[in-house]
Image (spheres, rainbow, N blue to C red):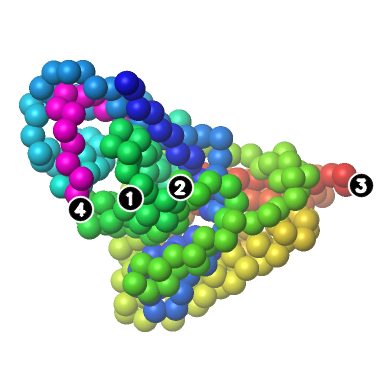
Amino acid sequence: MIYRSKAPLRIGLAGGGTDVSPYSDLYGGAILNATLSLYAHATIEPTGGNNIMLEAIDRGEEETHEWSSTLPLNNHLDLLKGVYNRIQKDYGITEKGFKLSTYVDAPAGSGLGTSSTLVVAILGAFAEMLRLPLGEYDLAHYAYEIERNDLGLAGGRQDQYAATFGGVNYMEFYSDDKVIVNPLRVKEQHLFELENNLLLYYTSTSRESAEIIKKQSKNVTDKKEKSLEAMHQLKHQAQLMKEALLKGRLNEIGEILDYGHQQKRQMAEGITNELLDNIYDAAKKQVLRAERYLVLAAEALWCFTARPIQNTK
């Protein structure tokens, strides 16, 4: 039998960065995100042999190991091996020979939560194979533990929960790894209109989020007022975005996104760069020249910009 799983990638619409410790532990974080029709895929195929074959199809990488309870972490396919090692440790895998294949619809470092979403997808395939009774919260927290504790990867918590819950969610983050996911009942016509006015823009470059996150966390620990205030405002931005979506005030979303972008620039060095600034400014000028409203958000190396919102009444 073949076991398959997929989990959706996400865009962060508001509050990005407030899910990262120690800010979320000290002040509580809030994020509003939405999943996309782009996915991380994982497939486990038993082979009946005595080898464990790992393959990242999109990256053109593969490894084969003799059966072992622990696979070596060597910065090559470590996400796949990290999940296997933890599942083997906690539950045991009796199927000795299998092939684990993965594929992600967006490149690594794109700012869409690819790494965390891939971990969730791999966990989903193992959970299916081993019939593990894991709910959404369990699966998301498990993925978070593997990334942060087992693999030592810096990051927040929104990606794992977005991948497991899907949809449009307002998430709250607190100390002791407490997370509350509030699925938003946004009217269908508002979602269609929002989707029609969002453009996912790829810059053909990628970035390493871990270094930025480390700087951001240090700014909180050092109580840098400018960075802290920016994070407080980003948390408020998530509340503004939630209200705008639920009430169908789509004409406000451009201002909310732009406000969040300006705040994120204050959080830590490396949030943006000259390339992103040029793209952002060019998009704003183009929209303003047409005397139409801006809907633009730049996160990591992806930008979102809105075409003019039409009156649908």
Residue 225 marker: none
Q: Is residue 312 above or below residue 32?
A: above
SS class of the residue under badge 2?
helix
Identify the secondary structure beneath mark 4. helix
Question: Would you say 172 lies left or right of 285 here?
Answer: left
Toward the viewer: 206 or 163?
163
Q: Position of residue 9 (x, y in %)?
A: 48, 41
Q: Which residue is mark 3?
A: 313
Badge 1 amino acid: Ala
Q: Give the spatial CA distance, label 2 vs label 3.
A: 35 Å
| Residue position for label 2 | 164
At x 20%, y 53%, the residue is: 150
The location of residue 4, given as percent across then percent down, is 38, 28
Residue 262: x and y, percent? 56, 64
Q: Mark 2 or 3 closer to N-term?
A: 2
Q: Quadrant of residue 169?
A: bottom right
Check disc 3: other Cα within 10 Å, few if <14, some if 14-19, many if 20+.
Answer: few
The residue that mark 4 highlights is 150
* Sequence-earlier tag: 2 or 1: 1
Number of marks in picture: 4
Secondary element at image label 1? helix
